[in-house]
Image (tube, rainbow, N blue to C red):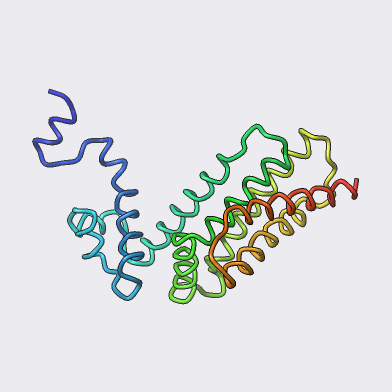
Amino acid sequence: MTCAVFASKRGRPSLEEAQRLPVRILEAGWEVLRDQGFDAFTFDRVARHARIGKATIYARFSGKREFLEALLCHKVEERRVSVMAIGDGLPMVERFCLRAALVVQILLSPDGMMMERLFDWCDQEFGDDEINYRYAMFADALVNIEAELREAATDEGIQIDDYPLAARFWLEGLLGHAKLIGSARTFDRAETERWARSYSEFFFAGLRVQT
């Protein structure tokens, strides 16, 4: 008798299902937030959406704060993986160009705007002088961008005197552009790709001038 069949007969999830369950619960929570809003967010609704018992959620998350913190981490990591998968193996400017366009697209997507609301909500409800969820996301992004810049500079022989500052300029440019066009009109893929090309070439040309 296989492990999966045994677990099924006992009414328990298989090992694979058990490992996937936290992500399934988080995704159900994301869909509840997206479809019904923050005021309607409850573990009862998440449980119904995930088709599980509410006790299963409490077995993994002690309360709403822990759940939403885990949801933020899950969605940030999901977004990071999707961005980092783009342009791997391409020259530095090409890689950053593709990723710049994708980041702007993600930020202006319905899921991206939902993430912005989730960060604001968590900072308002749970944030304090020691915890700021949006800043933590930015700090994590800067670490990843700096690592990419260091790798690219080594591979292509570019000298960057201040990696943290370069990473910050890069990120602030992306966020500023997304905020600017997001307040004016709907997302235009072709225009965003043109901007990403100009931005990437301008940014790295500036770095090369400093060598």
Q: Of 134 and 91, which appears nearest the observer?
A: 91
Q: Nearer the viewer, residue 101 or 9?
A: 101
Residue at 52% in and 56% down: 106
- Spot occupied by residue 186 in the image (x, y as percentages of width and height): 53, 65
The quadrant where residue 92 appears: top right
Q: Report whether 135 appears left or right of 1.
A: right
Q: Residue at x 78, y 52 (%)?
A: 203
Q: Residue at x 30, y 69 (%)?
A: 36
User: Is 111 in front, or is 136?
Assistant: 111
Look at the image and tell me in which quarter the C terminus lies.
Answer: top right
- Where on the picture, by quarter, is residue 26? bottom left
Q: Quadrant of residue 42?
A: bottom left
Expressed as whole percent of the image width and height from the top left, the position of residue 170 reads 71, 56
- Residue at (77, 57) in percent of width and height: 165
Q: In terms of depth relative to the viewer, which is nearer, 191 or 103?
A: 191
**Image coordinates for residue 6, horizontal then vertical, percent:** 13, 31
